[in-house]
Amino acid sequence: MKTYNWGIVGTGFIARKMAEALPFVPQSNLFAVASRNIETANDFSSTYNCKPFGSYEELITDPEIDIVYVATPHNYHCENTLTAIGNGKHVLCEKPFAVNSREVCSMIDAAREKGVFLMEALWTRFNPNIIKAKEIIDSGQLGKIKLISANFGDRKPFHPDNRFYSAELIGGALLDMGIYPLFNVLLMMGKPLSVQAMAAIGQTGVDLTCSIALRYSDDAMAVIHSTMLAETESKVTIYCEKGKIEFDRWVYAPEKVTVIPIDGESQDVTQKLTENIYNYEAVEMINCLELGKIQSSLWSWDDSLMLIGVLDEIRAQIGLVYEAHDS
């Protein structure tokens, strides 16, 4: 069986979580890490026992690397992914896949032309609790979805160097937090008929709070809130004709999933998880590679295009513009 050498581009929190997850992933070896600062790369490599590189390009062009995990700030996602694909690497790229639909399309077109695997690292999709909830909804045992209520709020104190407040680094509540409840809605209900959004745009040009209403056929709706100004329950509730499903904190990694029928006893359907739940998306990637696939059926290119398309519409409505990417 082939062992796949992983190279991680970026050294932040998410990069470290993936480094800790890879030991739980079959046929995987953390081979290298890259930072624009060699000292940062050296620190990471000494912790996780991998080869350090002082530039992203050096890692991406290393012939021993099979998979590049892009964990850089959002503004680099498209650039790093295209460089990796151009060098024949398979790519797992952090969410949001890129800044807008145009960038996502360019990444998908490049992967298709090169014949390499590409997937958005929307880790929530591969969480067994989410998979279980999706199975219950699809079974029809609770009837049709009529309303989803979801929110994610995490207070981020303002500081000029905080990436969450940086328009250059594609900050804001929507793309960092709102993407999770929005993903849950799209996964369970599909593409909406219409979207209405409003937001508070702060002094640095990014959204501090964003609220979204999505309308579906059969009088179904979803309501989403995200904010950097306050702590919220960060929960999801899916209301159906015959009952509801609750994701109990967190929206991106539910710790408990409960099915609550209108008539009958509540049922805890929470799945047993590994300690590091970032491994599930990497396992899916390896499974796809072993089957010769260049995209996942669990989170396909069309799924990523649907998500970024709705995000584009929301940004247009709230006036959230990232000039270096949207011009």
Image: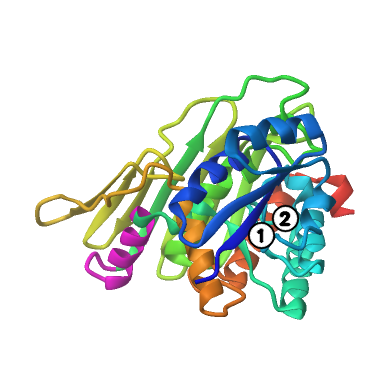
**Quadrant housing residue 98:** bottom right
In the shown orientation, is residue 282 left or right of residue 93?
left
Look at discs 1 and 2 and give the one toward the viewer: 2
- Residue holding disc 2: 98
**Which residue shows up at 51% across the image and 53% down it?**
123
**Which residue shows up at 80% across the image and 34% down it?**
38
Rendered position, 143 above or below 71: below
Identify the mark nearer the N-term, 1 or 2. 2
Q: Which amino acid does the dot numbered 1 rest on?
A: Ile
In the shown orientation, is residue 148 left or right of residue 122?
left
Mark 2, secondary structure of its residue: loop
Q: Residues within 10 Å of mark 1 (few under 14, many from 20)?
A: many
Q: Is residue 128 visible?
A: yes
Most foreground residue, 265 or 132: 132
Looking at the rendering, the stretch of residues picked out in magenta corresponds to: 129-143
**Which residue shows up at 40% across the image and 70% down it?**
218
Task: Find out whether residue 133 is within the magenta segment.
Answer: yes
Total numbered circles: 2
Q: Which mark is residue 141?
A: none
- Residue 227 point in image, percent of width and height: 57, 33
Most foreground residue, 154 or 84: 84
Q: Which mark is residue 308?
A: 1
**Which residue shows up at 30% across the image and 47% down it?**
246
- Residue 52 point in image, percent of width and height: 73, 41
